Amino acid sequence: MLSPDKVIVTCALTGAVTTKKQCPAIPYTPVEIAEEARRAHEAGAAVVHIHAREDSGQPTFRKEVFAAIKEETRKRSPVILNFSTGAVGLPMAERVAHIVESPPEIGALNSGSLTYAKYSKKRKAFVFDFVFQNPFSDITYLLKRMNEAGVKPECEMFDVGHVQNLEPLFDLELLSGNADVNLVMGVLGGMPATTKTLAFVVSELRPGTMWKTTPISEATWPITGAALAMGGQIRVGLEDNFYLPDGKMVGSNGDLVAHAVMMARAIGRQPATVEEARAALALPSPK
């Protein structure tokens, strides 16, 4: 069990769609991503969530790129690795090949489908709009491959109903013990980023669930504060938000982690070390 005065800070380093044009600090190459992982760890993050990019910035699931990111990151810090498996239109075997061949400690597991969109009030138009499909056939396939590789799933929930999606997975014994849950809040089509929603969703989780919040954009700091006050874990990072509360664009993921750590310390919580996070999440030794 993690002491209530500790908090596991996860940093989402780059995402799949953010670009250097939007924020110059967004990392693309394995070395850039590894350097951002180091900065995040030095600022207080115990876990880094990673999407792979080609050197051009294009998102990729090539296992060779994930292997290079893993190698470069391991050279620089002991931070816990969490690799993405979320993609649209990619065969399932390709979505999980990097998990099997270059196992991180954690693999992100999208736990349900939703209409995923972004709307611009200024343009009076949708910036993007698609259905993010994650049927149980895909979820169970990914879980089986993760279990075989000894990788712990992080159950990413984008909507309130996704909480119930875990129950069949426990019944099938594909999930066991205390689940690691990530509550993604503020995506159009998913759960709203409000304290009322957060309190309700947390109340519906199984006892003992290790939960964290991933608030998007301007919701980052209010929801991070609420999660800290409620005893949850937190995630920040350039995948989700570029700005500090005063509106200043950050120069690295480390700046976001440092502010989150300052918020935690202001209410008497300290960032968990890698060793403390590994024990709390029941993670294997790094491979």
Image (tube, rainbow, N blue to C red):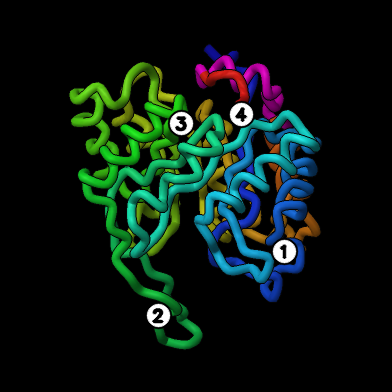
Q: Amino acid at mark 1?
A: Gly
Mark 2 vs 4, N-terminal side: 4
Q: Secondary structure at mark 4?
A: loop
Name the side, left or right, on which 162 lies relative to 107: left
Q: In this figure, which residue is indicated by the disc labeled 4? A: 8
In the rendered image, the vertical position of residue 35 relative to residue 230, given as above or below: below
In the rendered image, the vertical position of residue 75 relative to residue 171, given as above or below: below
Nearer to the camera, 121 or 208: 208
User: Does residue 199 belong to the magenta stretch?
Assistant: no
Nearer to the camera, 42 or 52: 52
Q: In this figure, which residue is indicated by the disc labeled 1? A: 247
**Circle 4 residues within 10 Å: few <14, some 14–19, many ≥20:** many
Instruction: Give the distance between the C-alpha atoms of the residues marked 1 and 4, in whole angstroms.
Output: 25 Å
Q: Secondary structure at mark 3?
A: strand
Mark 1 vs 3, N-terminal side: 3
Whether label 2 touches label 4, CB < 8 Å = no
Q: In this figure, which residue is indicated by the disc labeled 3? A: 211
